[in-house]
Image: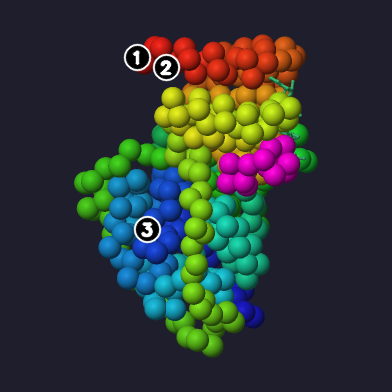
Amino acid sequence: MSNYNSAAIEEFKGGVWVFCEQRQGKMMPTSFELISEGRKLADELGEKLYGLLLGHEIEGIAKELGGYGADGVYVCDHPLLANYTTDGYTKVICDVIQEYKPEVMLIGATNIGRDLGPRCAARLHTGLCADCTHLDIDVPKYKDFLRSASTLAPAMIDSIPEDDRNLKMTRPAFGGHLMATIICPRFRPAMATVRPGVMKKNAFDQAKADACEIIKPNFSLTEDDMETQVVEVVKAAKKLVDLIGADVVVSVGRGISKDVEGGIKLAEELAEVLGGVVGGSRATIDSGWLSADHQVGQTGKTVHPKIYVALGISGAIQHKAGMQDSECIIAVNKNDTAPIFEIADYGICGDLFKVTPMLIEAIKAAKA
Ligand code: FAD
């Protein structure tokens, strides 16, 4: 651990990297989202975009990342990387970063990413902004000024080194009441974990996937580097709800409290006729009415379905943070001043136990 040094910024060669998480040889959706976002950042920086893929016998899935925008993928294949371990992954990632010195490193804020990101950042002695919801590049403003107000040739302006450029990392702060934009000006790589489901995936391009370069970096990993050993992977018997990938989400809030079972049943029925899944506000998770995988919001999942229905949800800022980018928001609330109505495309002021059955019947009739 002690042989990792914080390198001076000028030592960093550039490039935007994305840690691409796979489990049992299947790429996690967040990898495609981050590659797509990384493409935009790399283009703004005039840099290349690389995926960093760890695992065992995973080379076959690497090129797919090219289809979403990666110029290349660093593939680190080793039997000791077959299952995720904090020690093994951290060792290999830090070794490879020290060798190639990227400027930006993005990691999905999944359970694995949240474990891995801070460990790598501490070891590399650089900064990490956790749980970002927006990323941008801070290009020095004087260049824009020169472009608009001087007679210098564009090529000459472009050739001015942008050594003070930074990754702008935005995340909710103070319980979600304000958004903080953070930069890491003194160390590289600038590291960010990014909430799954927030960044939009590019359309897949097979030609780009075919052209994607596969690089096999040198690294060493032995049993001695590992403090932990995965004995067995036991998958949860229960199928978790796929909120992020759903086109329709019907969420319930504390408004169902007078008949919890009946309220959830109504949400399930409405979700079924619309071809969607059931979500919930944190109040419903904290009360034990729904399991944690249903939670939408700042500390739950971020969704942007085609239709989001909020039944008996007040619209607290932390809930809105996870659903306000939905294409169409329909809110049912008996209080006409509920904040959810401020962002709803269609607001129905009424008792959800009366309104929801009417919605279900109307949709069934329209389909018949
Ligand atoms: P309430 O705010 O109690 O609202 C219930 C609503 O139901 C009211 O508007 C009421 O008018 C309406 N209602 C009642 N009866 C009926 C009826 N019969 N018919 C129709 N309407 C009815 N919250 C999240 O959701 N997701 C998060 O990820 C999240 N993260 C958080 C993180 C932090 C750090 C903090 C501090 C809070 C977080 N919260 C989160 C909690 C958030 O602040 C709110 O407390 C929560 O969203 C409220 O849930 P709710 O809207 O279901 O309940």
Q: Is residue 136 above or below residue 249?
A: below
Q: Quadrant of residue 78?
A: bottom left
Residue at image location 44% in from the left, 45% down from the top: 33
User: Could you tell which of marks 2 and 3 lies nearer the N-terminus?
Assistant: 3
Q: Which mark is residue 368?
A: 1
Q: Which residues are magenta?
A: 282-294
Give the residue pinned by disc 3: 26
Front position in the image: 12 or 344: 344
Asked which secondary structure carries label 2, the reply is: helix
Asked which secondary structure carries label 1, the reply is: loop
Q: Three-letter amino acid code at disc 2?
A: Lys
Residue 157 % position (x, y): 46, 39
Marks 2 and 1 close (CB-CB < 8 Å): yes
Residue at image location 52% in from the left, 15% down from the top: 359
Q: Which quadrant contains ligand 1?
A: top right
Asked which secondary structure carries label 3, the reply is: strand
CA gap, disc 3 and disc 1: 39 Å
Residue 353 % position (x, y): 64, 19
Q: Three-letter amino acid code at disc 1?
A: Ala
Residue 355 % position (x, y): 60, 14
